[in-house]
């Protein structure tokens, strides 16, 4: 329907974001509901970050395949479209016009979408240089991983010959692989942590393959060069000593922040740890009929974990569309140091378990095998030794069985480590 210069669409469900989580939700919902499932994405091509992350390692947990990023993205798009979902690209959501009504701009004009349910699947992004407060010259040759991969894999552009990569997690090695394919050697990785964040399975072969040194407990303190990047200054955080490393390319990896502008604009409750929306087991936000999935909630986990979130939310959306309300009993989960955040943040004992029956915990420091402790009103309600390492990015995946003794009529549950 068109009114003036605004076209109004009335799908049953609108999904904002056509990355792994949004497309997986669309695939699961489209065949099961009476009405359209519409996916909006501001990019010109659906698929999210994997479409320009041209290396293998995608699809392991959700598709049981070992795929490249572009192949994984294409498969997700095909699955969603085959299920009956409609995908509208070059559609930038600009504002809310009601509890479950959004406005967007497209090359064809303005669009208003009035839906019965909304799924926010906007993902996360790496902080650019201004947000990291890195001083120095305004030089060409400074990228985030997404910018770099878009330039190299989609635009077939060129970068320099010597690179410094800020970060030492899985995405950092992805950036190093992209640089190698572009003919640029990664001469140094720098991380403020005392050890690399990625699995040894990646970091050890990566150092050998790329002939790259990883400098732990260090940071970039100055960018040198104008108009082209010539070097960066590196500081040792323990000694304060500084040195200059010659390079013509600087890649800023990790340090993720959710794309949460729509969450803030809606006044949806947010978690100060994740900077994303507060959700419960079923991925409901505190606005009725609005759900959130993927790396908008836990910045950042792997693409297949985000996709599993998307599949998980489908059942919750179906329940909402059929008039079922959430169980009333709930308990707030709070991450205590050294953990920065826990996801989901709200536990409803009478509701379905979170995706994969896991809580996600982000640690601000390296802990090889932590003993997780849960306390409620000062009383220890559970202990759990984790005998597996954190996932890339310091994310621990904790079985939700630790919540078995939590009392829904008591106060918040604090999750920390036993010293």
Image: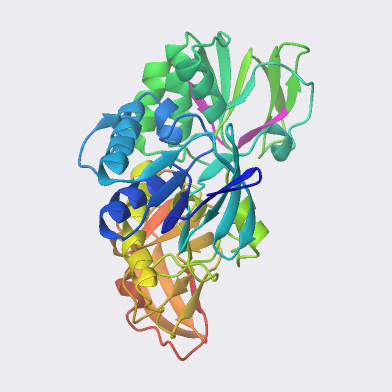
Q: Position of residue 347 (x, y in %)?
A: 42, 75
The foreground one among 244 and 394 is 394
Number of numbered callouts drawn: 0
Q: Which residues are magenta?
A: 212-221
Q: Position of residue 406 (x, y in %)?
A: 39, 83
For image coordinates 41% across by 40% down, the residue present is: 87
On the picture, is 365 further left or further right than 69?
Answer: right
Q: Is residue 253 visible?
A: yes
Please determine whether, in this image, residue 371 is positioned above or below residue 45: below
Residue at the far bottom in the pictured view? 409
User: Is 218 colored magenta in this rendering?
Assistant: yes
> What secondary structure is the stretch in magenta mostly built from?
strand
Q: How is the image coloured?
A: rainbow
Q: Position of residue 45 (x, y in %)?
A: 45, 30
Please determine whether, in this image, residue 382 is positioned above or below residue 133: below
Q: Is residue 255 visible?
A: no
Q: Position of residue 323 (x, y in %)?
A: 38, 76
On the picture, is 129 further left or further right than 383?
Answer: right
User: Is 244 colored magenta in this rendering?
Assistant: no
For image coordinates 52% across by 80% down, the residue present is: 412
Residue 177: quadrant of the picture = top left
The foreground one among 396 and 10 is 10
On the picture, is 15 further left or further right than 357?
Answer: right
The foreground one among 62 and 367 is 62
């Amino acid at each position: 329907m068109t009114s003036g210069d605004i076209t109004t669409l009335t799908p049953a469900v609108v999904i904002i974001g056509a990355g792994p989580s949004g497309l997986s939700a669309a695939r699961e919902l489209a065949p099961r509901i009476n009405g359209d499932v519409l996916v909006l994405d501001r990019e010109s091509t659906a698929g999210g970050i994997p479409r320009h992350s041209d290396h293998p390692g995608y699809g392991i947990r959700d598709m049981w395949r070992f795929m490249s990023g572009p192949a994984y993205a294409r498969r997700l798009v095909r699955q969603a479209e085959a299920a009956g979902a409609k995908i509208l690209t070059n559609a930038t959501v600009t504002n809310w016009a009601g509890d479950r009504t959004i406005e967007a701009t497209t090359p064809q004009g303005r669009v208003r979408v009035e839906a019965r349910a909304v799924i926010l699947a906007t993902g996360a992004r790496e902080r650019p240089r201004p947000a990291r407060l890195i001083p120095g010259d305004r030089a060409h040759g400074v990228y985030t991983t997404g910018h770099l991969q878009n330039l190299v894999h989609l635009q077939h552009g060129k970068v320099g010959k010597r690179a410094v990569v800020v970060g030492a997690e899985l995405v950092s090695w992805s950036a190093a692989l992209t640089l190698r394919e572009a003919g640029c050697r990664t001469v140094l990785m720098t991380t403020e942590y005392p050890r690399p964040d990625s699995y040894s399975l990646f970091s050890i072969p990566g150092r050998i393959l790329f002939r790259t040194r990883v400098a732990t407990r260090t940071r970039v303190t100055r960018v040198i060069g104008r108009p082209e990047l010539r070097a960066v200054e590196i500081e040792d955080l323990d000694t304060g000593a500084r040195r200059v490393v010659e390079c013509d390319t600087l890649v800023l990896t990790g340090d993720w922040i959710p794309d949460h502008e729509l969450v803030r604009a809606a006044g949806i409750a947010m978690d100060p740890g994740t900077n994303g929306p507060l959700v419960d087991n079923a991925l409901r936000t505190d606005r009725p009929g609005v759900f959130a999935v993927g790396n908008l909630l836990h910045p950042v986990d792997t693409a297949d974990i985000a996709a599993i979130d998307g599949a998980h939310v489908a059942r919750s959306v179906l329940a909402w569309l059929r008039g079922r309300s959430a169980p009333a009993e709930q308990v707030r989960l709070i991450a205590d140091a050294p953990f920065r955040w826990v996801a989901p943040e709200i536990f409803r004992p009478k509701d379905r378990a979170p995706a994969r029956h896991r809580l996600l915990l982000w640690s601000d420091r390296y802990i090889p095998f932590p003993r997780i402790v849960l306390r409620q009103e000062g009383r220890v309600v559970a202990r759990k030794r984790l005998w597996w390492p954190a996932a890339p990015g310091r994310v621990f995946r904790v079985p939700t069985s630790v919540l078995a003794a939590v009392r829904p009529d008591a106060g918040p549950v604090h999750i920390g480590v036993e010293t």
